[in-house]
Image: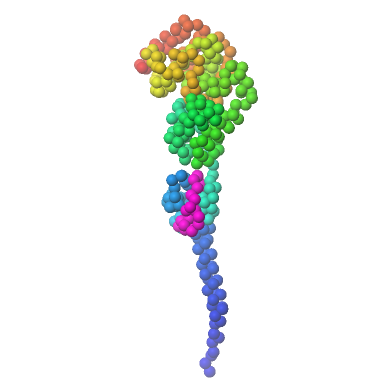
Amino acid sequence: MPSKTTPKRPWLIAASAAVLLLLAAAGLTYYFLLTPAASGRQTAWLYIDADDTADSVCAKLRPLTTPHAATAFSVLARHTSYERRVRTGRYAVEPGQPTVQLFRRVKNGLQQPLMLTLPQARTRQQLAARLSRHLMADSVALLRAMTDTTLCRTLGCDTATVVCLFIPDTYQLYWDISPQRLLERMKREHDRFWTIERQMAAQRIGLTPHEVQTLASIIDEETANTAEMPIVAGMYVNRLRQRMPLQADPTVKFALGDFSLRRIYRQMLSVDSPYNTYKHTGLPPGPIRVASVKAIDAVLHHSLHPYLYMCANADFSGTHVFAKTYNEHLRNAHRYARALNERGIK
């Protein structure tokens, strides 16, 4: 007799199909969402600025991730609320990071801060340009904030002394910080730097903190020799107390806007600028660069001596020779001028 086959039950077939579909869905979910997104072995950075859309974010992400991660991110962006609100920021694409975790961080604006070391700069324009290399804000927006008289007033400075807010150090902040928030942050750091001890030291000299920083900026331009800074500071403090013009060559360079000058000639000393300390007695309106902490402390703890004059050393060691009298200074200046001529330095 022919054998009889047991017919398969419909519910078993349906259950098997469902299990297969679930397994397939789980496999696709794992493949697209849970496998690592990064294409490299080192952390890469995704920068999203104010002009970006969901599509442009996906385009920026492609070179940083595997193809399937880029596809998964695009699908998630298209089927969530991400397209309606793209958050700016600097986001880490880390090795081993699942695509879905990366998407959540980007969607929720969970960016990572950066460590910003304040750049050296002589002018507000130069400072704005150098800061813009590390931040989302461009140099125009940064400079606009630095020259906003109302904003500067609320921060306890003016457009000439706004540079004083920038105390050289390394700060943790977000890449997309606005220019105003950056200045507010620098104001807090400035106030933290100016401890009671530093404020009292400034009072003993008869200077405000911003005046100390202005004098320190001149010292930074005069010498790179840290050991010599307190002596140079003491000389300028002596001049201020005797109401003598500072006659600092770096202020003439600042007034002329030419920092490449190797020599200052007599005709240059007549430049009409409040920063020309040959024409105007006292300190200029503000710093001629971002003053270093070493120079600030050199002013606060300047050397006590009788010197009123200084001249670059004729041996080109980067140091100076100091003098009590003008005649002694003239002899030093003659030796230095002769050394410049011998080397053909114009």
**x 49%, y 29%: residue:** 149
Most extreme residue toward the top is 327
208 within the magenta span:
no
Q: Is residue 1 left or right of residue 126?
A: right
Residue lying at the far front of the rendered structure: 150
Vertical relation: 284 (above or below) 65 = above
At 48% from the left and 13% from the top, the residue drawn is 281
User: Is residue 75 magenta-colored?
Assistant: yes
| Residue 171 falls left or right of residue 71 | right
| Quadrant containing the C terminus in the rendered view | top left
Quarter assignment of residue 299 = top right
Nearest the eye: 93 or 50:
50
**In this figure, what is the number of numbered marks?**
0
In the depicted structure, whether residue 113 falls above or below residue 190: below
Q: Nearer the viewer, residue 82 or 170?
A: 82
Residue extending furthest toward the bottom? 1
Q: Residue at x 53, y 13 (%)?
A: 240
> Which residues lie in the magenta part?
71-95
Report the residue at 55% width, 9% height from top: 306
Please provide percent x and percent y for residue 110: 55, 47
Q: Is residue 253 above or below residue 60?
A: above
Q: Nearer the viewer, residue 111 or 325?
A: 111
Give percent across and percent down for residue 184: 55, 34
Along the line of sight, which residue is nearer the eye, 334 or 78? 78
Examine the rendered structure and indicate whether residue 32 appears above or below residue 109.
below
